Image (cartoon, rainbow, N blue to C red):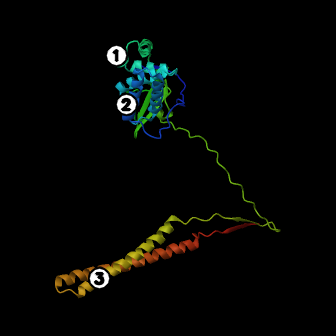
Amino acid sequence: MRVPIVLSLMIAGPAWAEDCETAYDMDALFEDLGASEEALRSKNYAASSKSAAAMRDKLSCLEQIMPVIIAGRAYRSIGAGLTLGGDDDGDKWMLTAAEVDPTFAYGVEDVPEGHPVRSLWKLALSEAGADPLEIEGKNLTDGKHFVDGKRINFPSATDERFHVYQWVQDGVHSFVIDGNAFPPEAFGEAVEAPAVEEVQPDPEPVTATEDLMSATVVKQKNWPGERVAMIVGGGAAVVGGGVMYGLSAGAHSRFEGSTTEVDMDKYKGQANAFFVGSGVSTVAGASAITFGALFFIIDGDPRPTLDFRF
């Protein structure tokens, strides 16, 4: 059931989001999950809370879609670890876990009888079941969108819970959101970069003469790309002409040493072709160099100039 409601979009994510210098894959998630669950079983709540916080902080760096069955288990471990460690955010994760995986029940192989996590889970199940809230007037951008491993077509998520929102477009982009506070990327909106104050250089003093003449140095002109290409290409053509001339001389030598009519015709054709190509390439290259240099002299002179104003 989708319940539209007008809510203001919260742009900033949780303060504890990871900076994602490295991606978080399923292997790393299972390692953190195992450490958290083992600490819970042994009632080492300090270690459990530490592992839960580490796992929570890395969820926004997931490089794969979170499977639903793993989402419930991970959220449950995060919620239990944080709550037993004194973090109030643990309640929200336990509620999400109860709604993602409501059929789960702790067994003796998970935690012993009388363990406090059993009471936490029972309370979460009793409070779960709220309907997702959709952001009215917003459409998800192109790509595939997931919340807690489930595909969504509208920007909706249950309020007062934490969720993992993932957008698939040129890779997997993961975010931890509070309620339905989807990030701007979900709607194809540009994310504003923090403003960087531009440092202006000190102005250079202008020296004036007795007759109030001022001189300003004009910025050095850039060499036009097409003229640079003419010079470079012309040089390459001249070099190529020299190579073909050498090949022509070699073919001529083989022609003079030929003993059969077939070889004579073959090497004669090669010598003529290389000789003609050498001439064409050399002339074209020399012309390109000449015109390129001429353009530099006319209006491409890269030397600094002075502009006088009276």
Q: Amino acid at mark 3?
A: Gly
Q: Position of residue 147 (x, y in %)?
A: 41, 27
Asked whether 16 or 263 is in front, the reply is: 16
Q: Is residue 241 depicted above or below 300 in this figure?
A: below
The answer to the question of whether label 2 and label 3 lie on touching residues, with beta carbons closer than 8 A, is no
Task: Looking at the image, tell me whether mark 2 or mark 1 is earlier in sequence order.
Answer: 2
- Of 254 and 115, the residue lying toward us: 115
Q: Nearer the viewer, mark 2 or mark 1?
A: 1
Residue at image point 47% right, 41% down? 21
Residue matched to label 2: 30
Q: Earlier in the sequence, mark 1 or mark 3?
A: 1
Residue 67, quarter of picture: top left
Judging from the image, what secondary structure is the residue with disc 1 in?
Answer: loop
Q: Which residue is mark 1?
A: 108
Residue type highlighted by circle 1: Val
Q: Give how far across and how far down residue 104 sits, in percent.
A: 35, 17
- Marks 2 and 1, how far apart in space? 21 Å
Total marks shown come to 3
Q: CA distance from mark 2 to mark 3?
A: 71 Å
Q: Where does label 3 land, which residue? A: 250
Mark 2 / mark 3, whichever is N-terminal:
2
Q: Residues within 10 Å of mark 2 (few under 14, many from 20)?
A: some
Determine whether the residue tagged by mark 2 lies in a helix, strand or loop.
Answer: helix
